[in-house]
Image (cartoon, coloured by chain):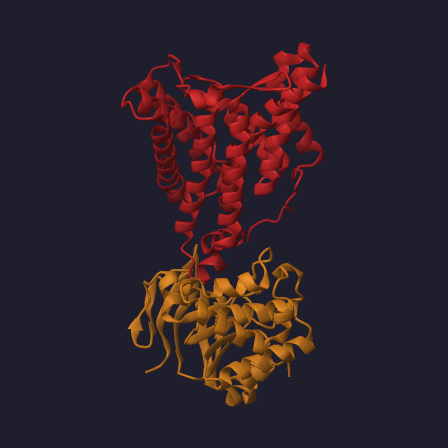
Amino acid sequence: MTFNIFLQHLANGISLGSLYALIAIGYTMVYGILRLINFAHGDLIMVAAYIAIYGIMMFKLPWWLSFTLAVIVTTIVGVIIERAAYKPLRSSPRISVLISAIGVSFFLENLAIVLFTGRPKPFPQPELFTTMLEVNNVYIMSLTFIIPVVTIVMLILLNYLVNKTTAGMAMRAVAKDFETSSLMGIEINKIVSYTFALGSGLAAIGGIMWGLKFPQIQPLIGVFPGLKCFIAAVVGGIGSITGATIGGFLLGIMEIMLVAFLPSLTGYRDAFAFVLLIVILIFRPTGIIGEKITEKV
Amino acid sequence: MPMLKIENLHVYYGGIHALKGINLTVPQGKVVSLIGANGAGKSTTLRTITSLVKPTSGKIYFQGEDITQAKTTSVIKKGITLVPEGRRVFADLTVYENLNLGAYLRQKDKNGIQKDMDKVFELFPRLKEREWQTAGTLSGGEQQMLAIGRALMSRPSVMMMDEPSLGLAPIVVRDVFNIIREIHDSGMTILLIEQNARAALKVADYGYVIETGKIVLEGPGKELADNDEVRRSYLGE
């Protein structure tokens, strides 16, 4: 393998890793605040992708407007899911909320089958994303660069929102201690909604880029990326935003490199993610950026 | 009009009848202590006032206004604050952020917050030195100071404290009670809960003794401290 080809694989890995990271952050933020694995999170990818498709194909919107709308609507869907399916269970055992999350996931998938049929729909490919760029005789699609750039911009923005704003400070407080946070006058439900909004917005951006990268959209499109990003979040250390980012990039790069260096294992590409999860759970259950496991009292 | 008044408060915790008709009055500018053994219902009383727990019956009045059904946020907004048991500072957040969260309900008032923070730092110079450290790195005593400072940041009219001396070294306990006295001298109304009955009664203008959800004794702090029964049960004499 020449160095150029290696670079091409690396670019692909970083690009895929960015996508994983964006989506994994939603898992980790929700887990950080509610100690809940939001299994419906992956399906938001599908929701965003379909909205984007319909905006362009049916309503003839320009792609950027359609994409923006998709992000906004998906964000609202994420918040509604929390209000409808998780908030009423706030004081129930955690397992009830988890089951509710699985229920929401099935609901969204089947609703999509009813609304959009099971037949795959092509995702529109605006020219900006499909231009081929030539670097040193290596051809790379512009999308491969756009994805990491968008991800980095989002990460910087998120870092600002979480660490520099009052709402972000409240979010970090609520993640640690519901009761004391409410004694500060923080309205827990508002902060939880805010967290879901941020996570869902990122998933929507991830979903649109997923659609651009793998332009065949069907109702179960969110299942596999959902599972993989959940793995990325766990590998990085669930509850930590930095962890989810690292986990996402790591998983993406390793997956691409596995296929690049050992082409005979291509069929095991998805299995690899799960093997990684098992290994991490055995040897480092708290992930790479291991948050110490402290039970909330 | 008393700052805080509780009338015939009943609270059930699951199946347990935790408070069985409590009556309690906290006059403006006074320190009132509520003493009693573990599980007597002291914390439940404070948690009910801040609406973390809902009462089954009874009334809570703040400056004459019925706040029994008010949400926690609006209780805090009205001017009641609670320094929770075990300090409960936000360990991952800096000292600065912890204090800032204390003033969460008036985030727009940046100047006021800075002024209040300076006052807190004047009261606790140690916190000023550690302004940018995370609260988890502080000692137990410093965390208690931070919890008190955080409570002051909300500009409360009445400050409730749940076992501020719990788990602290005796010399630090003395500091904490000196601080309570100092805050009281500045005009603050305080409702204090303690297992350390001796110290709590010494600082108190008025005291209540609670046993299994009922007030069994009350009186001026000094009188209670001299009461034979209190001395036998709570002062170990």
The picture places residue A107, in percent across and down from the top left corner, at 37, 26
Q: To which quarter of the image does residue B120 belong?
A: bottom right
Q: Residue at x 39, y 19 (%)?
A: A124
Q: Residue at x 39, y 23 (%)?
A: A109
From where the camera sits, is residue B212 visible?
no
Considering depth in this image, is A74 or B192 the residue closer to the camera?
A74
B190 lies above or below A13: below
Q: Looking at the figure, which quarter contains the N terminus of chain A?
A: top right
Considering depth in this image, is A42 or A251 the residue closer to the camera?
A251
A152 lies above or below B179: above
Q: Residue at x 67, y 38 (%)?
A: A288
Left or right: A6 in relation to A270: right
Image hue for chain A: red
| Residue at the extreme top of the image, as rendered | A264
The picture places residue A224, in percent across and down from the top left corner, at 51, 22
Left or right: B53 in relation to B99: left
A129 lies above or below A262: below
From where the camera sits, is residue A295 visible?
yes
The picture places residue B189, in percent across and down from the top left corner, at 44, 80
- Tally of numbered discs: 0
| Residue at the extreme left of the image, as rendered | A59
Left or right: B131 in relation to B113: right
Considering depth in this image, is B153 or A234 the residue closer to the camera?
B153
A249 lies above or below A292: above
Q: To which quarter of the image does residue A252 belong?
A: top right
The picture places residue B5, in percent across and down from the top left corner, at 36, 76
Q: Provide the letter of the chain coloured orange.
A: B
Q: Residue at x 46, y 62 (%)?
A: A184
